[in-house]
Amino acid sequence: MRRALRTKCECGEYWLTVHRSCVNTIEGLAGGYHYGPKEQGVGVDKPIKDGFYDNVIDTVRYAGVLFFQPLLTDPEF
């Protein structure tokens, strides 16, 4: 998702833009939704579920898996 937030398409727009009024999404992306430290035994693919940012950030993550990941691997997508 970081790459989608930083990469511009040919038209000059970013692949993914979050409107400033989407405060929970911005806070979640800024670190409210995070992965646990390795010393706690939490794997890399296991985010800490806090009950607040889960749904909105999971939705953003699903968009990344379903749309942005294929775009990165197949430019013809």
Image (cartoon, rainbow, N blue to C red):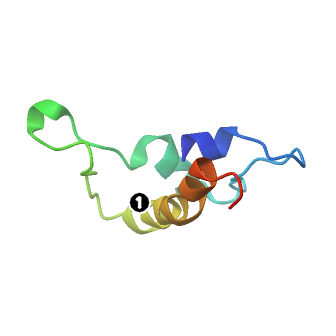
Q: Which corner quadrant of the image does residue 77 belong to?
A: bottom right
Q: Which residue is mark 1?
A: 53
Q: Where in the figure is residue 53, as x and y percent of width and height? A: 41, 60
Circle 1 residues within 10 Å: few <14, some 14–19, many ≥20: some
Q: Where in the figure is residue 40, as x and y percent of width and height? A: 10, 37
**In the image shown, does 59 or 3 lie closer to the viewer?**
3
* Residue drawn 24% across the image and 51% down it: 46
Q: Residue furthest right?
A: 11
* Residue drawn 47% across the image and 59% down it: 61
**44 on left or right of 41:** right
Residue 51, compared with residue 42, is above or below; it is below
* Residue drawn 76% across the image and 47% down it: 14
**51 on left or right of 31:** left
Q: Which corner quadrant of the image does residue 18 belong to?
A: bottom right
**14 on left or right of 61:** right
**In the image shown, does 18 or 4 lie closer to the viewer?**
4
**In the image shown, does 1 or 69 lie closer to the viewer?**
69
Q: Where in the figure is residue 12, as x and y percent of width and height? A: 88, 44
**51 on left or right of 59:** left
* Residue drawn 80% across the image and 47% down it: 9
Residue 60, compared with residue 14, is above or below; it is below
Q: Which corner quadrant of the image does residue 42 belong to?
A: top left
Q: Amino acid at mark 1?
A: Tyr
Q: Where in the figure is residue 55, as x and y percent of width and height? A: 41, 69
